[in-house]
Amino acid sequence: MQTTRYLRRERFTPLTYLLLAAALFFTMVLCICVGSVGISFSDTLTCVWNAVTGQPVPEGIAKSIILNVRLPRVLCVALSGAALSVCGAAMQGLLRNPLADGSTMGVSSGAALGAIIAVAAGFTLPGFSFGGSMVMAMAFAFASLILILSLSYALDRSMSTGSIILIGVIFTMFLSAIISLVITFASDHTRTLSFWTMGSFSGVNYEQVIILGAALLLCGGVLIRFSPELNAFAIGEENARHIGVNVRRVKLIILITVSVLIGVCVSIAGTVSFVGLIMPHIARMLVGPNHKRLIPASLFSGAIFLLLADLTARTILSPVELPVGVVTSIVGAVAFVIIFYQTRKAG
């Protein structure tokens, strides 16, 4: 009965997805058109359509900019935003914590540390240029998440919102110091790593698009598969256990899935904060709390948000490009305070 009442609050209509898909499409086209070199809407669509369908693409600067620079970047940004937002929605549902997110809980910082250590140590996988940093990012993301939850449970058996977030913030500060130390000694990569830690999609390619797309398809499918279990967690772990949910197994699968997805994103784009914190709340306002609807809606909203943030980062001070993490952090800091205030007020 509790689960039924919980799900009745959903406000989903098929039109919602249609509007989100349309908004995502036009946002992607806008991001491809706008930049230091302006390209018309018709030229953009013609170039992309001909490339996708195998037709000859007219030679010129538009072809070079769109197909080699902007299109892979826009695809990477959209996939990363979708992945981070989906991870945030899953973590908030699993932990019943509206402030749970890879950035607020230190998972993104853990993944960044793993990737930076791999780069500084020259750890690679044969035939896979950034495979070493990706594997290390995933491993460190999962280890960070387990460590933070273990510390939270040891200090506060109720694992309250305040305790988890406080430990996550402290852990993030600790990892930031370690990251700075590693970057200091990695003199050959100092400038690149410093810019990368603030989030950057500069120089991404289609290989990374394929990796991100495959990771999102696989991990997103797993999270949607466990959406009924996430709905059950909304009424408490004990109640979920009483209706037949294998709590330990489900937790482990979801935590591993989230760690893999965050690790892949961080290894490609660096630390992009607050996407997974803000956008699940926006999606929840649109479609309600049912994770079967919430996760796909978070996917669309996260992609749109990060695309707009990246567009702002590369155009607001053109030709100088800001790290996209700076833009998301400014917006996220304000949203974090509002969400935290509302959570404490409701509690």
Image (tube, grey):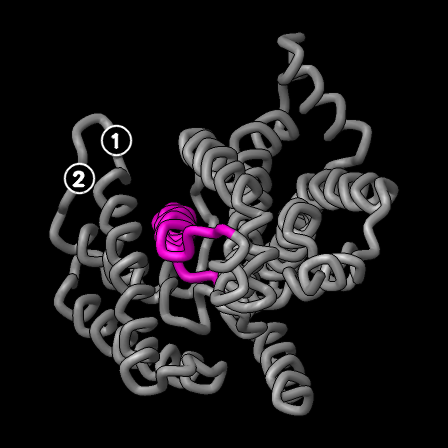
**Where residue 169 sits: x, y (%)?**
39, 81
Residue 186 in magenta? Answer: no
- Label 2 and label 1: CA atoms lie apart by 7 Å
Magenta portion: prevailing SS class: helix
Q: Which residue is mark 1?
A: 128
* Label 1: few (<14), some (14–19) or many (≥20) C-alpha neighbours in 10 Å: few
Q: Amino acid at mark 1?
A: Phe
Front residue of 121 and 2: 2
Location of residue 44 by image quarter: top right
Image quadrant where one finds the C terminus: bottom right
Would you say 222 lies left or right of 64 here? left
- Secondary structure of the residue carrying numbered label 1: loop
Residue that mark 2 sits on: 124
Q: Nearer the viewer, residue 208 or 32?
A: 208
Q: Is residue 256 magenta?
A: yes
Query: From the viewer's perspective, is residue 4 above or below residue 328?
Result: above
Asked if residue 268 shows in the view, the reply is no
Q: Which numbered tag is attached to residue 105?
A: none
Q: Quadrant of the N terminus?
A: bottom right
Task: Tell me the crowding category of disc 2: few under 14, some 14 to 19, or many 20 or more residues within 10 angstroms, Cα based.
Answer: some
Q: Which residues make up the magenta segment?
A: 244-273
